[in-house]
Amino acid sequence: MTPQLLEHVRAEALFVSDVQSSEHVSVDRIRRAVMISVRRHGPRGCAALVAHEFGEHPETAVSRMGWVLDQVRLAYR
């Protein structure tokens, strides 16, 4: 798996997690949330849920994905 693909999987997993952008989150919290989402839904399941959210709520999904990518990049340097 390439580093870029791994970043995408992590971002999608965090996107579908219960972590909210309004929370003050630690690196450990981000990593745990990613792990839980991947175990619960699998990488493809996370991607499907992200696609669904973009279809249903594109106005909020875009900003959430931006936040998610920032958090993933900080947590997995």
Image (tube, rainbow, N blue to C red):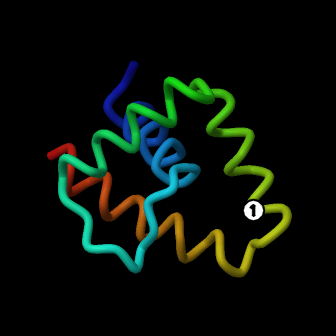
Q: Farthest left residue?
A: 77
Horizontal side of residue 38 vs 34, given as left or right: right
19 over 39 or under it: above or below:
below
13 over 5 or under it: above or below:
below
Closest to the observer: 71 or 36?
A: 36
Residue 44, image x, y percentages: 66, 27
Residue 28, image x, y percentages: 19, 47
Determine whether the residue tagged by mark 1 lies in a helix, strand or loop.
helix
Q: Farthest right residue?
A: 56
- Residue shown at 71% from the left, 81% from the top: 59
Number of other residues with Cα within 10 Å of mark 1, as a class: few under 14, some 14 to 19, many 20 or more: some
Residue 15, image x, y percentages: 53, 54
41 over 60 or under it: above or below:
above
Horizontal side of residue 25 vs 54, given as left or right: left
- Residue shown at 39% from the left, 32% from the top: 35
Closest to the observer: 47 or 26?
A: 26
Residue at which label 1 appears = 54
Q: The N terminus is located in which quarter?
A: top left
Closest to the observer: 38 or 59?
A: 38
Q: Amino acid at mark 1?
A: Phe
49 over 44 or under it: above or below:
below
* Quarter holding residue 76: top left
Q: Farthest top residue?
A: 1
* Quarter holding residue 40: top right
Horizontal side of residue 50 vs 70, given as left or right: right
Tally the marks. 1
* Quarter holding residue 54: bottom right
- Residue shown at 66% from the left, 77% from the top: 60
Residue 31, image x, y percentages: 28, 42
- Residue shown at 15% from the left, 46% from the top: 77
